[in-house]
Amino acid sequence: MPLAFRSLSHGTIAFGFFNVESDMLLLQHLFFFADRFCAAVVALAEQEGLAAPGEGGRGLSLAGWRIEDPAAIGDLGGAISGTALSGLIGATYREFPFPARPEQFRQAPEGARTQGVIGRMADQFGRAEEIPLRWNRATGTVALGEFVFTEAMFGLLVGYVERGGMPRWRDETPPDYVRAMAARLAQLRSPLRPAPA
């Protein structure tokens, strides 16, 4: 489930998985798949930061969706309970209801298999866009879309994905793309990797 994280630009924001059968992440009103997030983080770390467009540097981006209207996003609590199945979040819970048994409440490592279905839902409720990802090494900040974080704060987002959020990956087994990201960030000794727990 999404958790609260601190940003420099927007105060406390929500970030995380919102359905255990999907690997889609939300960042307030931006939505993108976890494998794309992991690939972009690795690319950013390998290039050791990219200046923002217009600052003489290149920019990275990841494909995703923007959904500005809260009604089109939906209500997570209502979707989990099955009482409010509106918006993108509600549509995902109509297709993939909240697990009936507590022990089934684990993030599915094979969640990428639902990307086709979830992507079509996102197309209905939002608009597709390339979400910029920038790392300013001089200021020690990372921006994902319009949201700006310190390197350490961004590392917490990375750590959330590594763990499978809350409730964690089923059987503590993350997908290959998450393991690959964690290994590469460790190899690079990147400041973008999460601090040890």
Image (cartoon, rainbow, N blue to C red):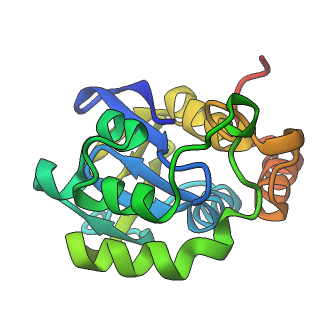
Tell me, yes or no, if residue 89 can be seen here. Answer: yes
The picture places residue 104, in percent across and down from the top left corner, at 73, 40
Q: Could you say which is closer to the camera, residue 145 or residue 57?
A: 145
Tell me, yes or no, if residue 191 can be seen here. Answer: no
The picture places residue 172, in percent across and down from the top left corner, at 86, 39
Count of number-bearing discs: 0
Q: Quadrant of residue 69?
A: bottom left
Residue found at the far top of this picture:
197
159 to the left or right of 76: right
Q: Could you say which is closer to the camera, residue 178 or residue 52?
A: 178
172 to the left or right of 147: right
Q: Is residue 51 above or below residue 103?
A: below
The picture places residue 2, in percent across and down from the top left corner, at 46, 35
Q: Is residue 48 above or below residue 137?
A: below
Q: Residue at x 72, y 53 (%)?
A: 108
Q: Could you say which is closer to the camera, residue 7 or residue 16?
A: 16
Q: Residue at x 66, y 31 (%)?
A: 167
The picture places residue 49, in percent across and down from the top left corner, at 54, 55
Q: Quadrant of residue 186?
A: top right
Q: Residue at x 88, y 51 (%)?
A: 183
Q: Is residue 103 above or below residue 96?
A: above
The quadrant the C terminus occupies is top right
Q: Residue at x 62, y 36 (%)?
A: 165
